Every structure is written in C-alpha cells, then in structure tokens.
Image: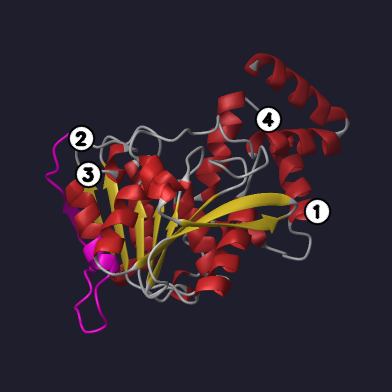
Amino acid sequence: MAPLIRTALNATARLVPGPAGRWAFHLFVRPLGRARLRPGEAALLAGARTDRLRVRGKEVVTYAWGDGRRPVLLVHGWSSRASRLGAFAEELLARGHSPVAFDAPGHGDSSGRASNIVEYREIIRELHARHGDFEAVVAHSFGVVAALFALRDGVCTSRFVGLGGVGSFDMVLEGFRAGLGLDDRVMRAMRAHVERRLVPDEPGVWERFGADHAPDELGAPVLLFHDEGDDMVPLAQARFLARAHGERARLVVTRGLGHRRILTDPDVVAAAVEFATAGSGTEPVVGTREGVGSTAS
C-alpha cells in the first residue's frame, strides 16, 4: 500500500494541500495494530481498579493499584498498552506505592483507532487531577516525549524515568515521512492541519512537543535507560535527552535488551523503581556521565 499512499498524497498536496494534510494526519496517528495481553499480564490488570475517562469523544481505560498514597504514573509507548509496564507496577506495589496507568485511545482496551501526543497530555492531566502530584513518572518509548510534554504543562512529579525514550518529536515525523516517501508539501500540509484543528489555541506548539523544550520546567531528577541495540529508537535519542536535562539527568546504557525486553529486565526494573521511590532524604541518582549497564540478553 505504501507506493499507492505515497503517490496519492504527494500528488494531492500539489493541487489541494488541505485534504492531503488531513489524510496524512489520519495515517500518522494510527497505531501499528493493537497490542494484545501477554501471558501473565491479565492477572495484574484483574487486580487493578479499572475506571474510564473520555478524551475527545474516546473512552480511555485507566488502571490504579494500591491504596492511593504515593502515586506513580506509568506511560506506555506507541502501539503498546499499560500492561507492558506490569513489572514496574508490581515492584512499585511491593514498595508501598500506588501505580497508575492507562491505555491510550486506539491502544489496549481503550476505544478509538488513533491517538496523538495531545490526547496523551489530556489523559495525564486528568489522572493528575484525580490522583494528585506523582511521586514519579515512568515512561517508555513515545510515552517519554508525551509524558514530558504533559509535565511541562501543569502536571507535577518528583522524579522521571525514561526507557527507550523518544526525545525529539522531529524524529517521529521524519520516520513517518521517510517510511511512506512523502514530500515536503505533504508534511507542511499535515503540520498546518494539526495547528488549525488539533491545537488552534496553542501557537508554537510544535517546538513544545520536543522533550528538549524548556527542560528546566520539569524541575525533577531524570534517570534514562536505553539499549545500545534498540532497533526502534536510536540510542542518540537518549543522549539527546540527557544533554537537554543536563546535571539532573543520568543515562544508563544496557546491552542485549533491545526496545522491549528493557521493560522486563529485573536489573532495569529494580534500578528504575529504586530511583522512582527514593525518599526526599535520599541522594538522587543524577549526573551527566553515561553509565553502561552490563545486563545480559
């Protein structure tokens, strides 16, 4: 289908850029399939308090565990679901914290066929209003850039953990453009559609999508994990994030875990949760040097 889509969109953008931008956007925001529960994940979800909220006409399924004290937000990536962060939820529960998670629209058990970074922000805002300031936020892949967008816009956390994270929203756009072979006219038209229809009251929003925008607004220590062999998000994205957040950030590079196994590796989970749950009297794990993990595949 890609050659047909490329030809149609590139040709349409030359004649009527508006429809081309709208169609490109509808493709851009659709996940690559709906991730299914894996063995062992169903039991964790069955023990959660399940609720629902509505975002732009879509029903979003949310999950909460624990007694509500010391909430920690878990944010899944693109074409994923909340249950993929189950190892973190279990460890947080064991330490007396209250994990909170959600399936974005078009993901997991939520309705819809598509989502976007603005909807992620609206969901995170609503969960912040319900649960209060987060002790920590733990995010994976696209969830990293989406969570940081929300955290610079009124949502508060004491610590941030990113795993295999996207730092530059431009990388997401470029991957979409290159994957379909779209020309600059299509991308300009899609950007205009987003500015006109999705966020008409937010001038300059494209710059704010990037995780390097106004990093001081986060004001929390940052711990990043990224595998050197990640085939979905290059390690350069984690280095970009670490540089943006400076002295408050530390990057740990793992080996043999790729983009997905990093979410279930016991050493990564333990280190991430230790950092996320560190009390106010505990020295935070921060620094600008890059740590290299010895985790085996």
Q: Which residue is mark 3?
A: 265
Picture coordinates of residue 207 (x, y %)?
A: 60, 59
Q: Position of residue 69 (x, y in %)?
A: 39, 75
Magenta stretch prevailing secondary structure: loop
| Disc 2 to disc 3, C-alpha distance | 10 Å
The residue carrying mark 1 is 196
Q: Looking at the picture, which amino acid does disc 2 mark?
A: Gly
Q: Is residue 75 in view?
A: yes
**Which of pointers 1 and 3 lies earlier in the amino acid sequence?**
1
Q: Work out whether mark 4 precedes mark 2 in sequence or the reverse, and give the earlier one.
A: 4
User: In the rendered image, which residue does mark 2 sit on?
Assistant: 256
Q: Is residue 174 magenta?
A: no
**Which span of residues is magenta-colored?**
273-297
Cα separation, mark 3 vs mark 4, equals 40 Å
Q: Say few, some or many: other residues with alpha carbon within 10 Å of mark 1 (under 14 / 14 to 19 / 20 or more).
A: few
Instruction: Name above or below for residue 281 compared with residue 252.
Output: below
Residue on which disc 4 sits? 183
Which of pointers 2 and 1 lies earlier in the amino acid sequence? Answer: 1
Q: Viewer-nearest of labels 2 and 1?
A: 2
In the picture, the disc for residue 286 is none
For the point 37% across and 44% down, the residue is 43
Q: Give the SS element for disc 1.
A: helix
The answer to whether residue 166 is left or right of residue 126 is left
Left or right position of 68 against 129: left
Disc 3 vs disc 4: which is toward the camera?
Answer: 3
Secondary-structure class at tag 3: loop
Query: Which of the two marks, 4 or 1, is nearer to us in this view?
Result: 1
